[in-house]
């Protein structure tokens, strides 16, 4: 790939700011495997308090955080229910199956991204020795940048409670949803036994996620984190970036959402592009496949980074400015000006 001037590939590409690096450099540290890193302890306590949970654990990645959650809810031969396109089922290399011996029960999404409540209920296995034991339902919110309704999360929580199941939230971008809705994170995450939040996406930290939840689950997660090789030593250097992100980078997610909308509106001006208006910071664009493929190649050759051909994904984040949005839109205009479209009529 050529040098990227306008990077809309993901909100994971953000680099730590000068203020964040200063906080990292000054972090008080200790050996976190011994429980003596004061900065890690502060981050864990802070996140648990923000979410109104008993405890939390700092981990290297969102993937590990979700895996720890599933391994803490489920034992060998148990089963979790998740959406067919849920990150923890479809984008985490099958970790729960490989490392946890946990079987997935994926469920199709409806057009709005939710799972049908009847489908969830039907997928829960009765107590019968033919079946894996269903232990937990996992939701993801935001889901592809889309906000799933708080009422829906409550309805799934009711099903989980009725069947004695755990409820996990992959809230990698939960703060995006809360900022967009004007809802407190504690209210948003209230129905869940465990919640995973990424610090390294829109919040702008270089590394890390935090898994929060019930004490017994976090205690198990701590053992599993060690088993998986995720026990880190002077991790306060990284946790300091997370604390800085919680202090400085939550409210500003509104700017990413505003820029995503500006980008979406700009893209929607081109008749060949079918733009899905964003709830938060992710814009999806559907386009005829060959045209999309040429557009993406053209944009990449002009220093605009994004992913996809027939369905393109553009993500705004704290290293994207208004000028970057305009610069990228200028390149889309340049593509259509050169008549690239004519060949596909
Ligand atoms: C990015 C992401 C993860 C995983 O995070 P990594 O730190 O990349 O492992 C999990 N769930 C969702 C919804 C994500 O967007």
Image: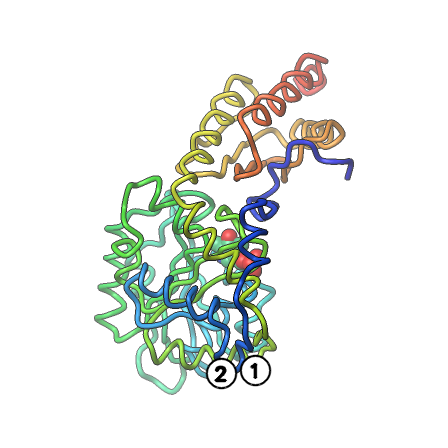
State the residue at coordinates (39%, 49%).
Answer: 175
Residue 161: x %, y % from top left: 23, 70
- Kindly identify which residue carries mark 1: 227
- Which of the 4 image quadrants contains residue 335? top right
Residue 247 seen anywhere in this rendered image of the structure: yes
State the residue at coordinates (21%, 71%).
Answer: 162
Residue 62 seen anywhere in this rendered image of the structure: no
Categorize mark 1 by other alpha carbons within 10 Å: few (<14), some (14-19), many (20+): few
How far apart marks 1 and 2 lie (CA) works out to 6 Å
Answer yes or no: do the residues labelled 1 and 2 have beta carbons within 8 Å? Answer: yes
Q: Quadrant of the C terminus?
A: top right
Residue 196: x %, y % from top left: 43, 62
Q: Which mark is residue 223?
A: 2
Instruction: Decide if residue 128 is on the left or right side of residue 315.
Output: left
Q: Quadrant of the N terminus?
A: top right
Q: Which mark is residue 51?
A: none
State the residue at coordinates (26%, 76%).
Answer: 164
């Amino acid at each position: 790939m050529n040098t990227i001037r306008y990077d809309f590939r993901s909100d994971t590409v953000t680099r730590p700011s000068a203020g964040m690096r200063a906080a990292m450099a000054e972090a008080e540290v200790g050996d976190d495997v011994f429980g003596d890193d004061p900065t890690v302890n502060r981050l864990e306590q802070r996140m648990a308090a923000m979410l109104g949970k008993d405890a939390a654990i700092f981990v290297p990645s969102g993937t590990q955080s979700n895996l720890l959650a599933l391994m803490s809810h489920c034992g060998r031969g148990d089963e979790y229910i998740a959406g067919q396109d849920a990150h923890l089922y479809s984008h985490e290399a099958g970790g729960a199956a490989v490392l946890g011996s946990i079987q997935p029960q994926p469920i199709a999404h409806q057009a709005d991204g939710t799972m049908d409540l009847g489908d969830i209920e039907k997928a829960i296995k009765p107590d019968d020795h033919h079946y894996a034991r269903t232990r937990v339902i996992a939701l993801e919110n935001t889901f592809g940048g889309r906000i799933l309704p708080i009422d829906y999360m409550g309805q799934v929580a009711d099903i989980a409670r009725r069947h004695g199941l755990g409820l996990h939230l992959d809230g990698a971008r939960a703060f995006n949803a809360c900022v967009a809705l004007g809802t407190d994170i504690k209210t948003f995450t209230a129905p869940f036994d465990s919640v995973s939040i990424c610090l390294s996406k829109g919040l702008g930290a270089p590394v890390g996620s935090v898994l929060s939840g019930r004490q017994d689950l976090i205690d198990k997660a701590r053992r599993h984190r060690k088993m998986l090789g995720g026990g880190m030593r002077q991790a306060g250097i990284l946790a300091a970036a997370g604390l800085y992100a919680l202090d400085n980078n939550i409210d500003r997610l509104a700017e990413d959402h505003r820029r995503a909308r500006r980008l979406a509106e700009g893209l929607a001006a081109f008749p060949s592009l079918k733009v899905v208006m964003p709830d938060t910071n992710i814009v999806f664009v559907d386009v005829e496949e060959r045209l999309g493929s040429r557009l993406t190649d053209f944009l990449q050759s002009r220093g605009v980074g994004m992913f996809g051909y027939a369905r393109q994904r553009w993500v705004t984040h704290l290293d994207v400015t208004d000028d970057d949005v305009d610069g990228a839109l200028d390149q889309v205009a340049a593509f259509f000006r050169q008549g690239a479209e004519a060949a596909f009529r």
